[in-house]
Amino acid sequence: MAEYQNQNNSHTEFVFLAFTGLKEHRRLLFIPFFLTLVSSLVGNTLLIFIIKTQRSLHSPMYVLIAAIACVDLSVPIVFVPKMLLGFLFDWNEISLSGCLVQMFFIYFISSFQSTILLWMSLDRYVAICIPLRYNDYMNNSTIFKLFMAGLLRNGLLILLIVVLASPLNFCSSNVINHCFCEHMALVNLACGDTTRNSLVGLIAILCMPSIDFVFIVLSYIKIFCVVLKTASGTSHQKAIHTCGTHLIVIGTCYVFTMMPLLAYRIKNSIPTDVRVLLSIMYLLFPSFFNPIVYGVRTKEIKVQILKIFQRGRLAPVTFELSKLNKHKK
């Protein structure tokens, strides 16, 4: 793929070029990423369907699980199809405006991962630490206010990142060493000073996942202190199990968030293809992993999933029996 150079004009068209180390085997990457995409779409769609159709699952905790499933469903749709077409047909071109739009939606939607996990920790805090006031604090009005606050905070910060990247002068290269429009991968192509862009990106990290993580940790410390002091027997185990499910999801989310951030800080020690893979997995793996965790570890959801599969197996048998009865008559 050619690299265009022009010292007088800023590039308005870019080319994604990642996993160059694989050379002609690069097309084989279509298979694992396509399977991961399909699994993610099926798992999250099933999770949303079950929570939406079952009235018993319309409590705030399950609404928040459905919300994180919506995030996990949306993130891959924004960038994976184009990435797969790039692997298969070398359709790697993207305009600057298209790149900025893709960047905004990737970061805006994925930023709600940590935000919803924070809301989940608050829900568990109220349910376990002040259960008598649960209905007063956790209701539709509260969820709406939390959603609007998250929308405002995340939207403004991500919009600021994109707005600051749009006027940069890209005069040296138009080749993005990535599979999607990652912020630093684009900014690194700019000529001139990009300190402001790096600083705003760092502030966004501190104001969103970092602050969310601090409050999540504080919430669960308080939760486990209360559980260990007051709960016993079945209620003790149920509280630990429910919180454990959320902690698995939180741990997975933050581990995959930190890996690409650290990779960019020590980029001279890590191959480019590895950094790209870590960035993709940061967005894609939680979308694949989260519905499995909630489906396996949340009893009420698992029961509904088993019912769906049982109906699928019983339907053909019932149909065949009805045909046999008709023939006998």
Image (cartoon, grey):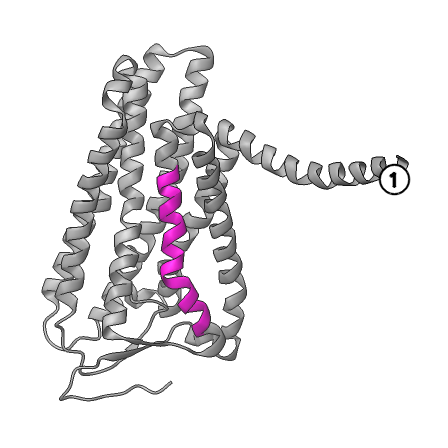
| Range of residues picked out in magenta | 66-86
Residue occupying image coordinates x 43% and y 74%:
86
Is residue 6 depicted above or below 277 in this figure? below
78 is within the stretch colored magenta = yes
Q: Nearer the viewer, residue 320 or 261?
A: 320
Amino acid type, callout 1: His
Who is closer to the viewer here, 31 or 214? 31
Q: Quadrant of residue 265?
A: bottom left
For residue 281, say whether it is visible.
Answer: no
Q: Residue at x 22, y 79 (%)?
A: 12
Left or right, residue 229 beside residue 329: left
Indicate whether residue 249 is drawn in magenta.
Answer: no
Q: Residue at x 28, y 19 (%)?
A: 135
- Residue 185 in sight from this viewpoint: yes
In this rendering, the answer to whether 172 lies above or below 126 is below
Circle 1: element type? helix
Would you identify the image quadrant in which residue 267 lies? bottom left
Q: Quadrant of the C terminus?
A: top right
Percent from the top left, x then y, of residue 279? Answer: 35, 59
Q: Position of residue 301 (x, y in %)?
A: 50, 32
Task: Check disc 1 and report the residue beneath it.
Answer: 327
- Please state, as top left, top right, bottom left or bottom right, where the N terminus lies in the image: bottom left
Please count the marks in the image.
1
